[in-house]
Amino acid sequence: MADITEVTDANFQQEVLDSSIPVLVDFWAPWCAPCRAIAPVLEELAGEYDGRARVVKVNVDDNQQVAANYGVRSIPNLIVFKQGQVAEQIVGAAAKPKLAKALDEAIS
């Protein structure tokens, strides 16, 4: 199973924007119950899309700059990046099929 990388303000450019494959970024915080609730789904997606897309997490409490740059005001906030651009943004604890569809569209 693929690991979910913790991304910071310092390495967001390298890990997400410069990625050669689509990246699903989970903007979250440890105190956020819906964020914790979707964590197993994100782990499943990371494994299923390993090699075709990546799943990373950004703790908004520790990395406020990147969260502000993308207008993250409520969490969980999931943004799919393709070639350094926002391909889709999903606010709230989305179901796995919705997240998989967003990844599939970014991959195609």
Image (cartoon, rainbow, N blue to C red):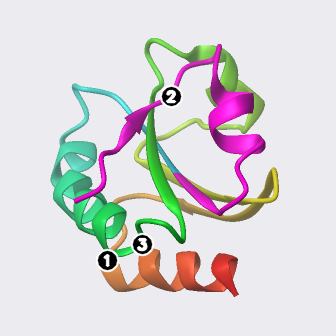
Which quadrant of the figure contains the N terminus? bottom left
Q: Nearer the viewer, residue 1 or 103?
A: 1
The magenta segment: 1-24
Looking at the image, which is closer to me, 33 or 40?
40
Residue 9, image x and y in percent? 63, 17
Q: Which of disc 2 and disc 3 is earlier in sequence?
A: 2
Q: SS of the residue at dot 3? A: loop
Does 105 appear above or below 39?
A: below
Amino acid at the residue labelled 2: Val
**Disc 1: CA contacts within 10 A as few (<14), some (14-19) or many (>=20):** some
Name the side, left or right, on which 65 lies relative to 7: right
What's under tag 3, amino acid-wise? Tyr
- Per the image, the residue denoted by label 3 is 49
- In terms of image quadrants, where is residue 31? top left
Q: How crowded is mark 2: few (under 14 residues within 10 Å), some or many (20 or more)?
A: many
Residue that label 2 marks: 7
Residue at x 33% of width, y 28% of height: 29
For the residues labelled 3 and 2, say whether their Cβ atoms are less than 8 Å apart.
no
As for residue 23 lying within the magenta part, the answer is yes
Q: Name the residue beneath numbered marker 1.
A: 96
Horizontal and vertical percent for residue 65? 68, 16
